[in-house]
Amino acid sequence: MTIKELQTIIKDIENSPLMSLELEMVDFKLKLSKNKVEYIEKTETINKPSNIETTTNKKETASEINTKETIKSPLVGTFYRSSTNNGTPYVEVGQKVKKGDVICIIEAMKIMNEITCPYDGVVKEFLVSNTDAVGFDQALMVIANES
């Protein structure tokens, strides 16, 4: 089976009402599923007494530390901050994002998968670099909910 044939099958499944497909041949097995799961890890913030020094240079106001959430990779692939090699990144640190905004791309099997933000917030930190190989459920970036 060629890459073109695989891409055609994947596109056909995306446009069909089928939720999953299993294809098995003599020396080839393919499983596809449209079940979407958002991978978000919540981290709680702890209010530190003012007499304790912190070793980090990052200073956040009380409104900024309400909740921080780590966006995780939903698949194995290559992480890209923009759609082209020298293109403008989808998001930058400090940028406000809205639910549904594209925040990065993960390339898997020559297919570019847009990763969207699951909520409104502000990009606080990237945990991987452009073109890094990422694993399933690997933390990609931190986005803080602002309320």
Image: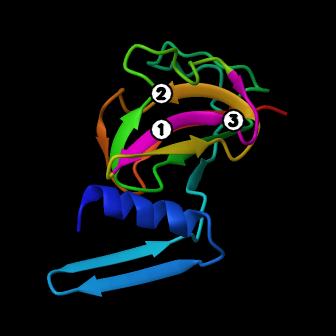
Q: Are marks 1 and 2 in contact (CB under 8 Å)?
A: yes
Q: Mark 2–mark 3 contact, CB under 8 Å?
A: no
Which of marks 2 and 1 precedes in the sequence? Answer: 2
Specify the segment rendered in magenta.
96-108
Residue 1 falls inside the magenta stretch: no
Residue type, numbered disc 2: Ser
* Residue receiving disc 2: 83
Q: CA distance from mark 1 to mark 3?
A: 12 Å
Q: Which residue is mark 1?
A: 105
- Residue at the left extreme? 27
32 lies above or below 106 = below
Task: Find residue 101 and name its label.
Answer: 3
Q: Is residue 65 visible?
A: no
- Nearer to us in this view, 3 or 79: 3
Residue at x 78% of width, y 31% of height: 146
Badge 2 element: loop
Residue beneath the point at 52% across and 79% down: 20
Q: Position of residue 140 (x, y in %)?
A: 45, 39
In the foreground, 57 or 92:
92
Q: Quadrant of residue 75?
A: bottom left
Our reading of the magenta stretch's main secondary structure is: strand
| Depth order, front residue of 49/110 | 110
